[in-house]
Amino acid sequence: MERETRLILVGGFLGAGKTTMLWNAAKQIMKEGKSVGLVTNDQAPELVDTKLLASNGLKVAELSGSCFCCNFNGFVDKLQMIQADADADIIIAEPVGSCIDLSATIIQPLKLNYKKMVLVSPLTVIVDPVRLASILDGGNGGLHPSAAYIVGKQIEEADIILINKIDILEEDELDMLLSKTKAFYPEKDIMVASALTGEGVAGWLKVVTSRSDAGKHITEVDYDKYAEGEAVLGWLNATLNLGGKGVEWDVVASDLMEILEDSFIMANANVGHVKMIMKSGDKFTVLNLTGTNPVSSLGEVGVADKVSLTLNARVEVSPEALESVVKEVLNGFAPEIQVEIVEWRCLKPGRPNPTYRFSEVVGVDKNPTGSFGGMEIIVLGTGCQRCEELFRTVEKAVSSMGLQVRVIKERDITKILTYNIIQTPGLVINGKLVSEGKNLSFDEVKHLIKNVIA
């Protein structure tokens, strides 16, 4: 990038209203005479978010097939691409809705290695008020316990908690929710907004575009529970062509979403988020369904002979069951409508495997009087099981020794080869390769660290 661009990273669980918030934020930024670009993210292409934002004339880059943290280099490439395409003063990036550990895996690497490229704003996590209230009361927000764990960890690592959809709350309900949230998270900035009406968006933007205290919190994450929380959801991304003579497509879209909702209820399948965008020329309608709120819609298509439909569904069933339910609905909901499948991807996310994971906040000296605060440990490996095991062993060893050490996972093969390594996994301490090709034990890692400290 030729100049520093501000990066606003906006996390939050599926259905929290992130995309609508991004749309409103982008419009607000452009009103102020600044240029803006957006980066979206999903486990598969054919993303409603990307098509919605692009339909409004915004510059959008999509990273699909992996989350930002598991393809950090790809994320950086998208940042560079959208900065060039949009000549962006500000980039807003929306990670996968089930993604956590953004501070350790995205923000800290950016702050350390790309500080001349982007100025990172405080991490904002957008939350659905109904789901938040349930979790604060000890519930699961209508989710599998491991999916609810993801929501909790997203909130825990946030610099700013942005409670969205305040338009659905009465004043006393909002006051009570704010009071509870502040009691649970007294160290965090808590803001409120309605992405639908635009209320509170300008105030939030003013805060995140004037601060750079990003990633103040790194949380402990149980990656087994995290992986389960993602895997309990079946993911479907589909694009279809629909046809019929003089059809009122807004009615069709509403009926389709209602039938899908009923079908998931009958299948006893909790909905994380189902959304669709239906387009005809430059007209479009967007419908959203979450497990906590009624169906919401935006825009109109009107009457036409054909439309394109992009459908994204995240539902607590197996991919096979999700595919079966949706195809049955599509084949039977309106016999007079012709349905042609253009793209169809149904999957279960794999285990999260971040490119980097920092154990401490960059730019904060937590051990100013100690002698080991500047130590850096790098685990070299392209993602094999032994490499992941060594990384976890190193994290445990560092934690047990009480050291303020930056632990990095290096998966870029070009960078790995600069250490003249023959076989992975490799262990580098303060720039020196101290082990290769061996899955070191906990005690062996501690011994190697002690040798460097001595």
Image: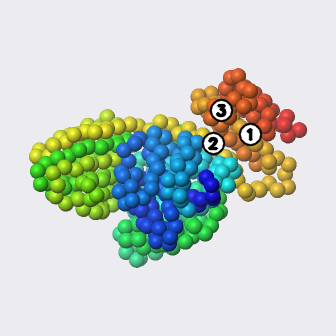
Mark linked to residue 356: 2
Check disc 3 and report the residue beneath it: 414
Query: Nearest the camera: 398 or 120?
Result: 120
Identity of the residue drawn at 68% across and 41% down: 408
Pair 3/2: label in front = 3
Q: CA distance from mark 2 to mark 1?
A: 11 Å
Q: Earlier in the sequence, mark 3 or mark 2?
A: 2
Mark linked to residue 377: 1
Residues at discs 2 and 1 in contact (Cβ within 8 Å): no
Q: In the image, residue 97 lies at what x, y percent?
A: 45, 51
* Figure colour scheme: rainbow
Query: Nearest the camera: 335 or 171?
Result: 335
* Residue 438 vertical position relative to residue 307 in the rendered view, above or below: above
Task: Look at the numbered disc 2 and give the secondary structure of its residue.
Answer: loop
Q: CA distance from mark 1 to mark 3?
A: 18 Å
**Amino acid type, residue under disc 1 in the picture:** Ile
Identity of the residue drawn at 78% across and 30% down: 434
**Amino acid type, residue under disc 2 in the picture:** Tyr
